Amino acid sequence: MSLAKTLKGDIIAVDLFEEFLEKLKENSAKENTTANIKTLSASMDKLPFEKEELDIIWSEGAVYNIGFKNGINYWKEFLKPGGILAVSELSWTTNCRPKGLEDFWTGEYAEMDTIAGKIRVLEEAGYKVLGHFILSDDCWLDNYYNPLLNSHKAFMDKFGNNETAEMIVERDIQEADFYKKYKNYYSYGFYIAQKL
């Protein structure tokens, strides 16, 4: 919605799940947007776009589903020369970190790397990095972990004593606790790069 209020032109919102796209349609109907929003239900690793069709690809908190390196290389073919990639990615903010924390994230997302490592991957893929920044604590806590943890009661009411549901809740709690304890060691980095 922020992009749609700021930009003119066409925005194609892509999500695998149609219900999220329907929610976007509802929200955009209530807002004053300057861009034209279209929706597309598709997987981020099977996009139906033409080669060099897009000016900007914007992906927040999602590329890990197909892997950072795989995603930025695949999406590059859809960007026009000089096109912009804006992508957030889980990143270490220091080279020194507790072993337990590193073991946890290696098990969860083996492609996690330092900011310098992510920039190197972008450069090796044929992008010029224009800038990057680290998301603040409130992005994690107010906009992700707190709503996630608050949703657990309704989630468990719906799924009852399901073993898989219990595992999901336990993993969410563990991940949130890790962040609260170790937030000085990692965060989401937001990377802005240009296709050369």
Image: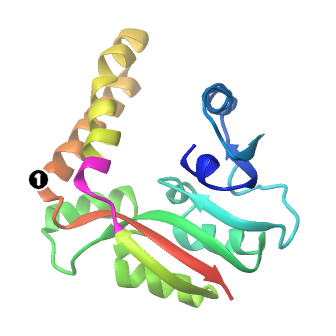
Tell me the quadrant of the picture where the C terminus can be found: bottom right
Q: Which residue is mark 1?
A: 181
Within 10 Å of disc 1 (Cα), the crowding (few <14, some 14-19, many 20+) is few
User: Looking at this rendering, what residue extends furthest in the right direction?
Assistant: 50
Q: How many marks?
A: 1
Tell me the quadrant of the picture where the N terminus can be found: top right
Residue 183, magenta (yes or no)? no
The location of residue 91, given as percent across then percent down, is 34, 69
Q: Nearer the viewer, residue 90 or 34?
A: 34
The location of residue 174, given as percent across then percent down, is 21, 42
Q: On the picture, is 109 further left or further right than 176?
A: right
Say if 121 sits above or below 112 in the image.
Answer: below
Q: On the picture, is 33 further left or further right than 92?
A: right
Q: Quadrant of residue 152?
A: top left
Image: magenta residue range: 134-139
Q: Nearer the viewer, residue 18 or 54?
A: 54
Q: Quadrant of residue 36?
A: top right
